[in-house]
Image (spheres, grey):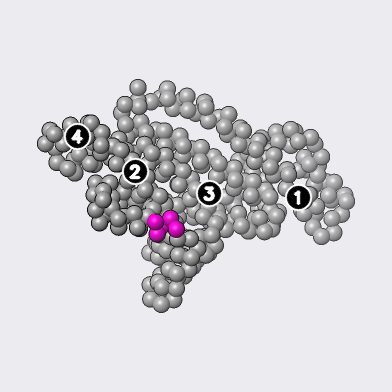
Amino acid sequence: MGAFLLRRLAGLLPTLVFVSMLIFGLQQLLPGDPAKILAGEEQDPSVVAYLHHKLHLDEPLPVRYAWWLKGVLHGDLGESVRNQQPVAALVAQKLPVTIELALLAFAIALAIGIPAGIVAAVGRGTGWDALANALALWGISTPNFWLGILMILLFSVQLHWLPASGYVSPFEDLGANLAAMAMPAFVLGNAIAAVLMRHTRSAMLQVLSADYVRTARAKGLSEPVVVLKHALRNALTPIITLGALELGTLLSGAVLTEQVFSIPGFGKLVVDAVFNRDYAVVQGVVLVTATAYIALNLLADLAYMAANPRLRG
């Protein structure tokens, strides 16, 4: 396990370097001069020249990348043009909100998608299979923003059960926090649950027809033991892969959902930064998101080995 982890980490380092080069290079293609934006409306030439020197904009691109990478390695992602705050501080402020929303949505998706996929596979061709497929089709086809608006109209405007928008820190009021996050978490989890259900059903159907499953049944093992211990464990590999990718998508910020429910997370941060041409913030968020994807893929590899002992050799 330790050797495998070291090999994977060694392989991820070049990926991280390439991703950082790609993010920095694409940011240089964006229109506008950051120094002129920082200088304000007057754009005094002496101030612009000073900012060019301070931000290393008067140096060649490889040198600028080296300065930027040095700052990233020291936790400095630049400074927001709009807020005049370090990007790292803004990320640290918004990231916990998105992490909480992502974990709640992912928990809902797992609680719905995997059991529904198992039931659909075991009861293939029955009414339960048709019902699970119909729910999956609904989840895949329904736009998140539309479902969010409908839930606001029902649970907030009509029934007055949940707040329509906003965010409360769990450290201030856990009950109010869960009430505010319930609808956006369900909206996001509903879509992921549909995809998880389809993949779980497909993987389980392949495994349930395997020889070792028939052997387990021939030994007289109960159906729940055969399905959950023998079949599901061997069907987890594609489900883990999909789960890691979907969780990475959630951590990158569900832009539309966060906008509909006014959740101050990564999605809202990116939208505001794009509208205000705050490129340093966009660059920092993309870098953090890419790093999260790489880390989740590493965790997925470790989860493969935990779920299937045959992969440990």
- Label 2 to label 4, Cα distance in Å? 18 Å
Residue under numbered circle 1: 31
Residue under numbered circle 3: 252
Q: Earlier in the sequence, mark 2 or mark 4?
A: 2
* Image marks 4 and 3: residues in contact by CB distance under 8 Å: no
Eye-nearest disc, 4 or 3: 4
Task: Find the magenta span and give its range.
Answer: 137-141
**Vertical comparison of 161 with 185: above or below:** below
Question: Which amino acid, mark 1?
Answer: Pro
Secondary element under disc 1, as helix, strand or loop, is loop
Q: Earlier in the sequence, mark 2 or mark 3?
A: 2
Mark number displayed over residue 202: 2
Residue 175 locus on image (x, y percent): 38, 64
Whether residue 124 is visible, yes or no, is: yes
Q: Earlier in the sequence, mark 4 or mark 3?
A: 4
Q: Residue furthest left?
A: 220
* Image marks 2 and 4: residues in contact by CB distance under 8 Å: no
Question: Which amino acid, mark 2?
Answer: Ser
Whether residue 233 is visible, yes or no, is: no
Secondary element under disc 3, as helix, strand or loop, is loop
At label 2, counting other C-alpha atoms closer than 10 Å, the crowd grade (few under 14, some 14-19, many 20 or more) is: some
Q: Which residue is drawn at 40% across and 62% down?
A: 182
Q: Which of marks 1 and 4 is nearer the N terminus?
A: 1
